[in-house]
Structure formats: C-alpha cells, structure tokens
Image: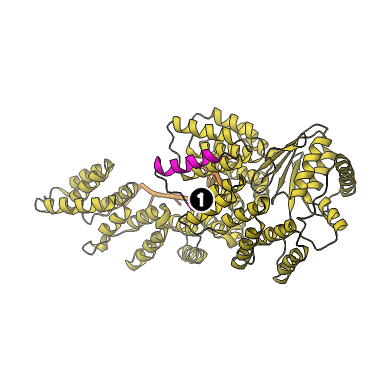
Chain colours: A yellow, B orange
Amino acid sequence: MQFQNVKSRVVRTVTESIVGADAGSKRSAEQSCLSLIEACNSLPRFSQLLARIIKLGLRNNPLVLTKFAAVSSELGVIDYASSFVFSMDADSSLYDAFLFNTFIRAYAHTSNLKEKALFVYNSMFGYGILPNKFTYPFVLKACAGLGNLGLGKAVHGSTVKFGFDNDVHVRNTMIHMYCCCGSAIEDARNLFDEMHKCDSVSWSAMIGGYVRLGLSTDAVDVFRKMQIAGVRPDEITMVSVLSACTDLGALELGKWVESYVDKEGIQRSVELCNALIDMFAKCGDVDKALKLFRRMRERTIVSWTSVIVGLAMHGRGLEAVSLFEEMIESGMTPDNVAFIGLLSACSHSGLVDKGRGYFSLMTEEYDIAPKIEHYGCMVDMLCRAGLVNEAVEFIQKMPFEPNSIILRTLVNACRAHGELKLGERISRSLISNEPMHESNYVLLSNIYAKMSHWEKKTKVREMMDMKGMKKIPGSTMIELDSEIYEFVAGDKSHKQYKEIYEMVEEMRREMKRAGHVPSTSEVMLDIDEEDKEDALNRHSEKLAIAFALLNTPPGTPIRIVKNLRVCSDCHSATKFISKIYHREIVVRDRNRFHHFKDGLCSCKDFW
DNA sequence: ATAGGGTTAG
C-alpha cells in the first residue's frame, strides 16, 4: 500500500521538476544531493530526493545512486530504488561493484527478498562488473538464509575463481552458509579446519552451526577446542554456547558459562542476558531466570517472551500471565511469538478463559493475525482441559487445515479423555499421511492399549517393522560434577552399571511396597507382561534417577532431561520415588517441566 | 565508501 503511494507521488514530483532542471556545478550538486540523502528519513522526503536526483542531473552518478539505494533499503522501498537505478534510461557504463553490493546487501538483509540478492549478484556479471571481496559475504548470507546449498556451492566456486576464498570475512560467512544448509555441516567443518587463522567469528559460526542442527555436544566440544586454541570468545560466542547448554539441559555448564562471562569481562549484551534467561528457565531454574530478568536495565520483546515461556514450561501460568500484563503496562508491544508463549502458558496451567480472551485480544487490540501455531495453542489448551469436542469444533472452524502437530495433540487428548474411536480414526489417517513419523504409531498403539485391543496393538508394532522404522531411542541426560551422562534404555555402558541396576531393583521393591502398580500399556515391545515390567524398569529415566540417587547427597534435588515425552509409568514411578527417597526431582521432557515432590507432580498428571 | 558469527515458538 505504502509503496504505491510513494510511487504515484514520486512520478508527480518528477514531472513537475524536470522542466526546471538546473545544471549547476557538478560537485556542489553532488554535495547537496548527498546531504539530502543524509537527511532522508521518511517516505515523503524520499520522493523529494528522487526528484532532486533527476533535476540535478545526477541520474547516473554512482556515488549518489549507491547512497540512494542504501537509504531506500532503510525505508523499506528497496524494490522501488532498484527499478529506478537499473531502469532502461540509466547509463549502465557507470555501474560499479559498490552499487551492486548495496543492493545485494539490502536484499540479503530482508527476509523475504533474499532471492533478489542472488538475482542482482548474477546480473552484475551481465554488466561486466565483477564481484569484490565485499560482495561475497552478502551473497553468502542470502544463500544461508535461503538454505540453498546448490547456490551456496556455486558462489563458493566463484570465490575460489576470483581468489577471495581465503579472505577471513568471506570464509567465515561461507562456514555460516554451509552450516545453514543442513546436510552440509561437514563442508563447513572442513573449511573451518583448513583455516590458518580462525578468529572468534569463525569459532562462533561453527559453534552456532552445531547448535542450530541440534548437535549441541559437538558445539560444546568446539568451544572447548576454542579455549585450548587460545581464542578469546566474545558475547556472541557465549550466546551460542548458552544455546547448547539450553538444548542439553546442562545447568551446571550454563552456570559455569555465566561465571566465565563475568570473569572474562565479556560484555553482558541484551542478547546474552536473554540467552542466560532462556538457559536458566529451560535448565530447570526458572527463579534464577526471573531474577536475571528483573535485573536487566534494557529489555527487548525476546527478554519478556523468554521469561514468559520459561514460566509456562514450569506450569506457572498465572505468573506468566501477570508478566505479560506487566509487559503491556511497560509499553512493550507484544508480537506473535509473545502470544504463542502466553497462550501456551494458559494452556499448560488450565487457564482456558484467559486463553480465549487473549486469543481475541491478539487480533482485536494488536492486529496480529493468528497463525497456525496460535490455533495449535488453543487446541492444546482445550484438549488439556478435557474439552475434546470443543477442540474438534475449533479445528473445523479455523481458517487453516490442521497440521499433524495439532492432530497429534487431539489424538493424545482423545486417549486421555476416553474418545478412543475418534482418536483411532485420526491417528490412522495421520499414519497414512505421514507413514514415517514414529509418534503417530505410538499414539495409535497407546489408544489400542487403552481399549485393551492387544492384537491390534501388536499389529501397530508390526506395521512399523514392515516399514523398516526404528524407534527413536529414549534417552535421559543428567549432569554430575560438570560431566554430562546420557542413559538409553537398557544401557550397560556405564562403569557403575551393576550398582545402577541394583538400585533400580531396590527402587522397584520400594515402589511396589508403597503401592505403585507398573503400567505396561505404553510399552511398544511385543513381549509378555513380566518382561514388559522389566523393560519399564530399564527405561532411561529410571537408570538416570538411580544413578543420581547413588551419586548425590541425600536430600539434594535431581535434575534430568529426557529427549521424548515421559511415559506414564515413569511419571507415576517418579512421583513415588520423590516421596520414598525425599528428593525433589525435576524432569524436563520434550515439551515441559515436571517438578516431582512428595509424590505429586506440577503438571497435575496431564502432559 | 560497502564485509562475517547470536536470543523468543506448539
């Protein structure tokens, strides 16, 4: 809309002013035009500027055009500037690399126009202009943003051809580009390993690349190598390292990072503080996250959202809601992500009416169109509250086709609230749409278990085998003395494994005495009941808890991180264990936290 | 005159 306005106004002003074109001294004309560009901070001024450029005969002045392009990028009308600069009546013999770089830069930094950066880059060759060392970081950044490995490799080839591939900026962006192209992390690593002089940016690009792919252990390894190499990390490096801690649930490591930041005098930027908040919240210490948040002088929407999401994950929905209100009062405008956090807070804490209210507020007051994620939160909220029918109606009325995430939420609710037929039907269709997605089978299998349809349940397992699917192994991580230990079901790789299994056996006896009945219905293996019980006892979370009971002083809290959802037997067992052994047990699963204490869980048994 | 790596989401 705005764009159209500018255009028509520009055309009018141009026509009016052409007649009076005045050829003054070229230099002073250039000077006056440059100061106009300097002062160009609004769309009306932009229109006047364009008229002046033409009037002063600077239509083909490369410096003026370059600055003009830069300012148009700031005002969000880069497309308009590019059609002006590269129009038919422009004198292309005056184009230079700098002019092209300006456009490539502007497009590479605009999220939905990255293809155009590559288009401009390709077109410069057509004008006989070759890229320089400044061109490549922009182009590579665009490739990274697009995740287009083919283009990235072609650009890489071009850097080699023109001899810029050893420039440190080019190389760092190239590493970043390969990291952003998913499967190419090895290419990034090879480039990185070949570098003679890595600076903190190279290391950060590599660490960040591993984190983005969920290879956080590798990220931490690279960080350790960085320290050995003696390169001083900066605040950006530390943000990536903190992301790795967050992903791993490594609270101790995260705390170490915080003290390291202070010790090394690394600047606590807003982003670094945000990463710390996120880390503390997602590693189980949401109170520490809150404390940090309160101490921040300058907060961004990310700071607020991080702490709201953190509270939501811990089931502290009311606090999350009041923080959201506080945010509004402080004058911060919520964005769509903040609303996702808020709605998920309502959902995890059963605040259905509040959630409904905020869902309407989002459009009515803030003019944010709900995306499928927001609808997803609403469905989740209705499902948790047991309002399955309402959830179904809501899905039918929403302006999107439900995605599989929403449908899985619904199926899980069907299982939990006894709508088994409906759940069966939906999960069957999920399987036919997404035959290689494991959780679709798990859901169906759990529904059959609840229906006591054991033969059908076995068939589900067979379907998976037939398709050659492997179950994602459940694994649990626990941190002890700054080491991260990972357990998988039936794990015997640990040095202490004999003691661990003895402890598991003791736990089993104690739980039985306290009245725990093993719930074998979620076991996916085709084995008899007694073996199923045995399989349950070898679940990774039980091994990790046994390991913690053996190796930590009585009464200290136990924190574990699970890669999947907690199974219902482990959930019930952990409640018993928390009571029997007088331990607070904090479990982070795929979606949220469970705080087990005195035989109860903060999730109120719905997750 | 123009360059690189970072934070929030079901």
Q: Does residue A198 appear anywhere in the picture?
A: no
In the picture as drawn, the residue positioned furthest to the left comes out as A19
- As drawn, is A402 to the left or to the right of A250? left
Q: Does residue A221 appear anywhere in the picture?
A: yes
Q: Quadrant of residue A474?
A: bottom right
In this orientation, which residue lies closer to the viewer: A111 or A442? Answer: A442
Image position, residue A111 (x, y; %): 43, 53
Q: Overall secondary structure of the magenta stretch?
A: helix
Q: Quadrant of residue A513?
A: top right
**Tag 1: Cα neighbours inside 10 Å, few (<14), some, or many (≥20)?**
many
Q: Which residues are magenta?
A: A350-376
Residue at the (50%, 48%) spot, across then down: A374
- As drawn, is A499 to the left or to the right of A603? right
Image position, residue A112 (x, y; %): 41, 56
Tell me which chain the residue with mark 1 is part of: A
- As drawn, is A400 to the left or to the right of A287? left
Q: Is residue A300 magenta?
A: no
Q: Which residue is mark 1?
A: A375
Residue at the (23%, 57%) spot, across then down: A60
Residue A429 to residue A134: above or below: below
The amino acid type, in three-letter code, at marker 1 is Tyr
Residue at the (64%, 65%) spot, across then down: A428
Image position, residue A449 (x, y; %): 75, 58
- As drawn, is A381 to the left or to the right of A515? left
In the picture as drawn, the residue positioned furthest to the bottom comes out as A466
Numbered-mark total:
1
Residue A564 to residue A448: above or below: above
Image position, residue A467 (x, y; %): 69, 70
State the SS at label 1. helix
